[in-house]
């Protein structure tokens, strides 16, 4: 980061005396001074030594046979074996130290990059401050002009300072881990070469598709923050906030999909909560109607809950959860950064059938293959869909997917082209899980009847996956919403036709439902309570 790129922090600091201008001790200046060249040179030197040790060990192993034939006494062979063992232990140490150095370089690069985005975001907010507000005008009467504007700039400056200090803290924490790794004693065995419970930062994430995709998308996001298009700025700000929330919950976040121009102003995005590159278990969550990539906070929070639950059930394994807001979501327009009347009408009508799910199926299938390529080859992959998201997941599963399990939650139907769980080519029926609350009207015939009146379709959403005929594995858990009390007409009707309070993504991803989903994600289907279909 250059000094010029941080000029915004100086502009902000002049409005807030408590913030130091970016001098030598400020977070901005310290981030700007960070360079990874010497660290990477050191890692390259270690790699060279490691290569020499490996070659020498290979030659030594072939020589042991000759030594054994040349000397009948065991001492030369034993001595040579100890030498080779020492070389192996040293090679292991150097490999881990080189990986730790490279990992810290990645942390530094990410912190500097994110700091640039922090500054761009602050400048974008400044850029769009109005020249005066009614509070400013009132302040002028009392001799305090531009009061509101000054207060807002003060707040922006404080937020920027806090963000930059957070970036710097992540670098310092990584450097502390590196110091620990470099001080490790090889005579204490491999376990002493670990910085805590997990290994030191793993080698070369730069070559992983997840890292490259994340960097490319973050660069596009930063460009949108500095653009003159208010819609793109709003979309970029919302995605940036989602990334920060994901990183706060899991310590790692990646921007897997970023397309602000998709779907007539809705845009599309996907964020990984946790590290895809090291995860043993990967889950992809697809939301339903009335959601938008511009407001992903709820989805991020539930994804983090699922990740926490999965890692609690299988503490020795890492889990990453991707929230996929990558399709044209019906009824998203109240939350989208831009829309038109015609788009809003089409967006609303789309909620009455599986048409949007069918159109989204090849998009989700393609993104699932991409996500799979970003993960370890041995990782277990589970796809969970809620409401229209479940219909989208079912439609996508008609393709040959690198997926182990499906979970259809609060589903209005499996889509137009799937009559049973046996219809998915790459997922066995036993791994197709259904979670439908009997109190949820979206899963009941009442929703089909209403949608049929709008569309004229006999089965607007397709077969009910919770039915016995569908042949899926029905999860036996109760709703987390309390039963509606009272004996009045409204209460009686809701008990018969379903209560909309039961149809929420949070209700389907908490309590015993969340525990069952966590078991599926980590491959412990035997722990999932099941029941017959409807």
Image (cartoon, grey):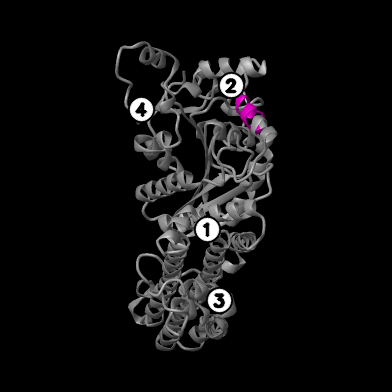
Specify which label sits upstream in the sequence, 3 or 2.
3
User: Which residue corresponds to mark 4?
Assistant: 478
- Number of marks in picture: 4
SS of the residue under disc 3:
helix
Q: Residues within 10 Å of mark 1 (few under 14, many from 20)?
A: few
Q: CA distance from mark 1 to mark 2?
A: 57 Å
Task: Give the overall secondary structure of the magenta segment.
Answer: helix
Counting from the top left corner in percent of width and height, residue 112 is at: 53, 73
Q: In terms of sequence position, does the residue under pointer 2 or pointer 4 come before the other?
A: 2
Q: Tell me the element at label 4.
A: loop
**Disc ID at residue 132:** 1
Marker disc for residue 7: 3
Q: Quadrant of the N terminus?
A: bottom right
Contact between labelled residues 2 and 1, with CB atoms less than 8 Å apart: no
Residues shaded magenta: 347-356
The earlier-in-sequence mark between 4 and 3 is: 3
Instruction: Say which of 304 and 346 sits in front.
Output: 346
Q: Earlier in the sequence, mark 1 or mark 3?
A: 3
Report x, y in % for residue 499: 42, 22
Percent position of residue 241, x then y? 50, 55
Disc on the earlier residue, 1 or 2? 1
- What is the CA distance from the residue labelled 4 to the residue labelled 1? 53 Å
Q: Secondary structure at mark 1?
A: loop
How packed is label 2: few (under 14 Cα within 10 Å), some, or many (20 or more)? many
In the image, residue 27 lies in the stretch drawn in magenta: no
**Residue depicted at 35% across the width and 68% down the height:** 196
CA distance separating discs 1 and 3? 24 Å
- Which residue corresponds to mark 2? 463
Q: Are marks 4 and 3 in contact (CB under 8 Å)?
A: no
Q: Position of residue 85 (x, y in %)?
A: 43, 80
Alpha carbon separation for disc pair 3 and 2: 59 Å
Instruction: State the CA–CA distance, disc 2 to disc 4.
Output: 22 Å
């Amino acid at each position: 980061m250059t000094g010029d790129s941080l000029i915004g922090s100086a502009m902000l600091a002049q409005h807030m005396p408590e913030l130091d201008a970016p001098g030598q001790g400020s977070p901005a200046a310290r981030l700007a001074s960070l360079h990874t060249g010497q660290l990477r040179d050191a890692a390259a030197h270690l790699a060279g030594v490691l290569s020499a040790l490996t070659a020498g060990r290979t030659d030594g192993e072939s020589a042991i046979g000759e030594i054994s034939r040349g000397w009948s006494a065991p001492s030369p062979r034993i001595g040579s074996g100890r030498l080779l063992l020492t070389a192996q232990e040293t090679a292991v140490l150097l490999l881990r130290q080189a990986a730790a150095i490279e990992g810290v370089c990645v942390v530094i690069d990410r912190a500097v990059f994110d700091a640039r985005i922090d500054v761009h975001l602050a400048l974008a907010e400044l850029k769009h401050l109005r020249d005066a507000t009614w509070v400013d005008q009132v302040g002028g009467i009392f001799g305090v002009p531009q009061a509101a504007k000054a207060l807002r700039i003060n707040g922006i400056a404080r937020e920027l300072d806090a963000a930059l200090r957070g970036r710097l803290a992540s670098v310092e924490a990584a450097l502390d881990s590196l110091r620990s790794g470099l001080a490790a004693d090889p005579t204490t065995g491999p376990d002493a070469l670990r910085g805590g419970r997990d290994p030191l930062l793993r080698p070369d994430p730069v070559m992983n598709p997840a890292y490259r995709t994340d960097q490319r998308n973050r660069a596009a996001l930063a460009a949108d923050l500095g653009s003159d298009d208010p819609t793109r700025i709003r979309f970029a700000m919302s995605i940036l906030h989602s990334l920060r929330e994901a990183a706060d919950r899991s310590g790692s976040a990646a921007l897997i999909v970023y397309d602000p121009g998709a779907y007539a102003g809705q845009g599309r995005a996907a964020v990984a909560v946790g590290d895809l590159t090291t995860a043993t278990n990967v889950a992809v969550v697809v939301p339903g109607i009335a959601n938008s990539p511009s407001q992903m906070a709820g989805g991020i929070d539930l994804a983090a809950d699922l990740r926490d639950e999965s890692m609690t059930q299988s503490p020795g394994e890492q889990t990453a959860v991707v929230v996929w807001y990558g399709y044209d979501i019906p009824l998203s327009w109240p939350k989208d950064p831009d829309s038109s009347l015609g788009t809003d009408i089409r967006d609303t009508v789309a909620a009455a059938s599986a048409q949007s799910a069918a159109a989204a199926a090849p998009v989700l299938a393609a993104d699932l293959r991409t996500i799979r390529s970003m993960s370890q080859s041995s990782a277990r992959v589970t796809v969970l869909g809620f409401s229209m998201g479940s219909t989208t997941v079912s439609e996508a599963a008609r393709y040959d997917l690198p997926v182990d399990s499906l979970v259809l939650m609060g589903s209005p139907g499996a889509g137009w082209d799937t009559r049973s769980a046996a219809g998915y080519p790459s997922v066995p029926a036993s791994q197709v899980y259904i979670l439908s609350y009997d109190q949820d009207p979206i899963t009941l015939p009442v929703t089909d009847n209403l949608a049929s009146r709008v569309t004229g379709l006999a089965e607007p959403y397709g077969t009910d996956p919770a039915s016995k005929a569908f042949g899926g594995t029905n999860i036996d858990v109760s709703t987390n919403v309390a039963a509606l009390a009272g004996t009045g007409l409204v209460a009686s009707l809701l008990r018969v036709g379903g209560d909309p309070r039961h149809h929420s993504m949070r209700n389907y991803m908490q309590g015993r439902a969340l525990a069952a989903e966590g078991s599926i994600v980590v491959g412990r289907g035997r722990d999932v309570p099941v029941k017959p279909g409807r």
